[in-house]
């Protein structure tokens, strides 16, 4: 099968496809993001359904009789259910040891060091919803100048501050300091700046969020492709998830509308050959974590409406892969990520249609497929399904 010039990976953040067998270990037994959203909200998804979303999600009403895409779902081999492990594994790097979590807050010695280095006091220090904790502690933060530090079920150290009290660029520098402190046994997957604005009773988070991740702990397809002289373009928070490693150019767009716009602009250019890696975050950040099933469905409809704009720009030597990084079931009792399979949808003008790719053992099969499709000599974890995409002669 011929090699491709460009591969596009679209990650629909938090769009899980059913609880994995070990989901009960994470408190997520019975979670099923896609099934629960589709069967409670019935969004109109003609384009994703044509790609094979109904088959991947096992929702009969969304199963196109003759899908134009190839479809399946993938299990996560890594120990975790967070953004970092999900994206790293898609890129061919699984994480055998989970990043540490702090469901009861961070230890005093860690916060003492944080206060010493940054010069700021701390309030909060618990697992909490981001929108709820700024309502709870926003006034105290304004009165005292102390930073709101909190976590979740994921491996994150989140710092919230009002933009009038701590400007975003200052908060980002504080997060960089925290990233240096959080090493070894306290090496959380991400330190996240959570700026907010507004008045008490009407606080809101702004678009100046920024993530500070660990460097990938091994080789990813981004490293391989960049090392071979290919382009690695990143849209959205991809640059943060990989700490800029292996990326040749990035567009840090915020929100799905802007990220899809940036994706389309990249696809219009003919100067690059390699990988375009895109994160569409709204399903997760705006709706999954807020238990907003109607909003989640609306975000899926938005992706579906704009999908033809992307497809129209693809040539015969382009390959489109749509997947997710974990679940975030908005109908589930918690507001955390959920340990789920993720959908796998693949389309291209020069590939077969309607091929079942089955249930893959790891997200890393995407990474292995990308390398084979682009004719790379590099190797990562995972088993390529590229040969399955060959059309019948």
Image: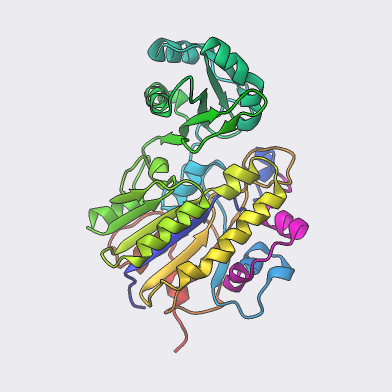
Residue 273 image-quadrant placement = bottom left
Question: At 52% across and 52% down in the image, what residue appears?
Answer: 256
Would residue 47 be counted in the magenta stretch? yes
Prevailing secondary structure class for the magenta stretch in the rendered image = helix
Image: 343 above or below 282: below
Quadrant of image for the N terminus: bottom left
Residue 74 image-quadrant placement = bottom right
Q: Can you see residue 18? A: no
Residue 360 image position (x, y, % from top left): 54, 61
Residue 376 image-quadrant placement = bottom left
Which region shows up in magenta?
29-52
Quadrant of image for the C terminus: bottom left
Point out the residue furthest to the front here: 199
Classify residue 223 as left or right of residue 211.
left
Question: At 54% across and 41% down in the image, what residue appears?
Answer: 82
Residue 10 image position (x, y, % from top left): 48, 58
Q: Can you see residue 132? A: yes
Question: Relative to the observer, which residue lies in front, 91 or 383?
Answer: 91
Image: 97 above or below 63: above
Question: Relative to the observer, which residue lies in front, 97 or 109?
Answer: 109
Residue 241 image position (x, y, % from top left): 42, 42
Question: At 71% across and 65% down in the image, what residue appears?
Answer: 59
Would residue 153 be counted in the magenta stretch? no
Question: At 57% across and 71% down in the image, what residue appears?
Answer: 51
Image: 314 above or below 101: below
Point out the residue furthest to the right here: 40
Question: Relative to the observer, which residue lies in front, 95 or 194?
Answer: 194
Classify residue 287 as left or right of residue 345.
right
Residue 249 image position (x, y, % from top left): 30, 51
Classify residue 67 as left or right of residue 173.
right
């Amino acid at each position: 099968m011929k090699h491709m010039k460009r591969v596009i990976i679209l990650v629909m953040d938090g769009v899980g496809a059913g609880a994995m067998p070990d989901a009960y270990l994470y408190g997520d037994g019975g979670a099923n993001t896609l099934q629960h959203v589709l069967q409670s909200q019935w969004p109109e998804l003609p384009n994703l359904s044509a790609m094979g979303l109904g088959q991947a999600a096992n929702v009969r009403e969304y199963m196109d009789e003759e899908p134009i895409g190839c479809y399946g779902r993938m299990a996560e081999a890594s120990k975790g259910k967070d953004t970092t492990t999900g994206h790293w594994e898609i890129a061919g790097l699984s994480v055998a040891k989970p990043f540490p979590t702090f469901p009861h807050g961070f230890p005093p010695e860690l916060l003492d060091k944080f206060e010493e280095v940054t010069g700021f006091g701390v309030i909060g220090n618990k697992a909490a919803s981001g929108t709820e904790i700024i309502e709870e502690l926003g006034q105290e933060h304004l009165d005292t100048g102390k930073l709101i530090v909190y976590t979740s079920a994921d491996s994150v150290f989140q710092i919230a501050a009002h933009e009038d009290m701590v400007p975003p660029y200052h908060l980002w520098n504080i997060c960089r300091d925290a990233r240096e402190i959080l090493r070894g046994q306290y090496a959380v997957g991400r330190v996240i700046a959570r700026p907010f604005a507004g008045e008490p009773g009407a606080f809101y988070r702004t678009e100046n969020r920024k993530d500070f991740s660990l460097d990938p702990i091994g080789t990813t397809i981004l490293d391989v492709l960049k090392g071979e002289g290919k382009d690695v373009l990143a849209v959205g928070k991809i640059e943060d998830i990989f700490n800029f490693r292996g990326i040749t150019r990035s567009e840090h767009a915020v929100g799905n509308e802007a990220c899809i716009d940036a994706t389309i602009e990249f696809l219009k250019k003919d100067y690059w050959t390699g990988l375009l890696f895109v994160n569409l975050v709204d399903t997760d950040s705006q709706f999954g974590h807020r238990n907003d099933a109607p909003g989640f469905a609306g975000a899926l409809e938005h992706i579906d409406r704009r999908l033809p704009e992307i497809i129209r720009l693809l040539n015969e030597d382009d390959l489109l892969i749509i997947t997710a990084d974990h679940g975030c079931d908005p109908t589930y009792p918690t507001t955390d990520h959920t340990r789920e399979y993720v959908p796998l949808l693949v389309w291209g003008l020069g590939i077969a249609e309607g091929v079942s790719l089955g249930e893959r053992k790891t997200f890393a099969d995407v990474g292995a497929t990308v390398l084979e499709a682009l004719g790379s000599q590099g190797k990562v974890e995972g088993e390529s399904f590229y040969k399955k995409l060959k059309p019948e002669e």
